[in-house]
Image (spheres, rainbow, N blue to C red):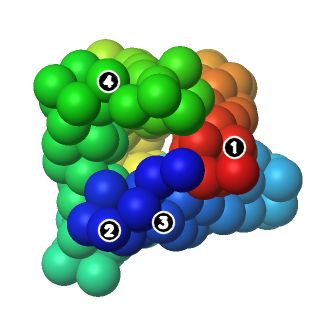
Amino acid sequence: MIDGPYFVLTVLGVLGCGLVAGVFCGFSTFVMRGLAELPPAQGVAAMNAINVAAVRPAFMLVFIGSAGLCAVLAVVTFVLLPDEGTVELLLGSALYLFGTFGVTVVANVPRNDALLKLAPGTPEAAVYWRSYVREWTMWNHVRAVASAAAAVSYTLALT
């Protein structure tokens, strides 16, 4: 069984991945649907405000901190090769690092940056908004599932 500091790191991994999964699940299930119902100018303005507000210590500590924690868990697991939980720990780390953090970097952030460059009331923003909502939400589903699966995988490593 996992114990000591390794146990604490794994529990923190469960909590961090679970918190991030909850945030992304909320966005996928109702925030983006609500924003999509607004006129494009209002939706663009609201999403831009959300994207600016997200890059604050409270969320970034959980989001980036969880990525760092997942990386540490992966390295420690490779070094220690524990008798139990190795597969679950490595899988949880990979799910979060690639499926959550990686997807954020390559899929969601570039779309956010492109949206931020558009003035909300312009025809260009209205056209981009339709594809933005669809594509951003699809990738957000991936992030939500990957974060939740990482939390489950870490939980299984503890059992």
Q: How would you rate the neighbour count of disc 2 (Cα within 10 Å): few for under 14, some for 14-19, many for 20 or more?
A: few
**Residue behind mark 4:** 81
**CA gap, disc 3 to disc 4?**
18 Å
Is 107 situated above or below 117?
A: above
The spot of residue 30 in percent (x, y) is 82, 60
Whether residue 49 appears in this view of the structure is no
2 or 1: mark nearer the eye: 2
Q: What residue is drawn where x is 54% and y is 59%?
A: 14
What residue is disc 2 on?
Answer: 4
In what element is the residue under mark 1? helix
Left or right of 98 on screen, residue 23: right
Instruction: Indicate left or right for 151 with 7 as reference.
Output: right
Badge 2 or badge 4: first in the primary sequence: 2
Please indicate whether residue 12 sits to the left or right of residue 24 in the image.
Answer: left
Q: Nearer the viewer, mark 2 or mark 3?
A: 2
The percent position of residue 67, horizontal first and vertical second, equals: 28, 45
Which is more toward the observer, 135 or 88? 88
Q: Quadrant of residue 150?
A: top right
Residue at position x 59%, y 42% in the image: 157
Earlier-in-chain disc, 1 versus 4: 4
- Can you identify the residue that label 3 sits on? 11
Task: Answer with mark 2 or mark 1, whichever residue precedes in sequence.
Answer: 2
Q: In this view, does 158 lie above or below 94?
A: below
Q: Who is closer to the viewer here, 140 or 10? A: 10
Task: Say which residue appears at 70% left-offset and 51% top-offset.
Answer: 159
Tell me the CA gap for discs 2 and 1: 17 Å
Q: Give the mark nearest the N terminus, 2 or 3.
A: 2
Residue under pointer 1: 156
| Amino acid tagged 1 | Leu
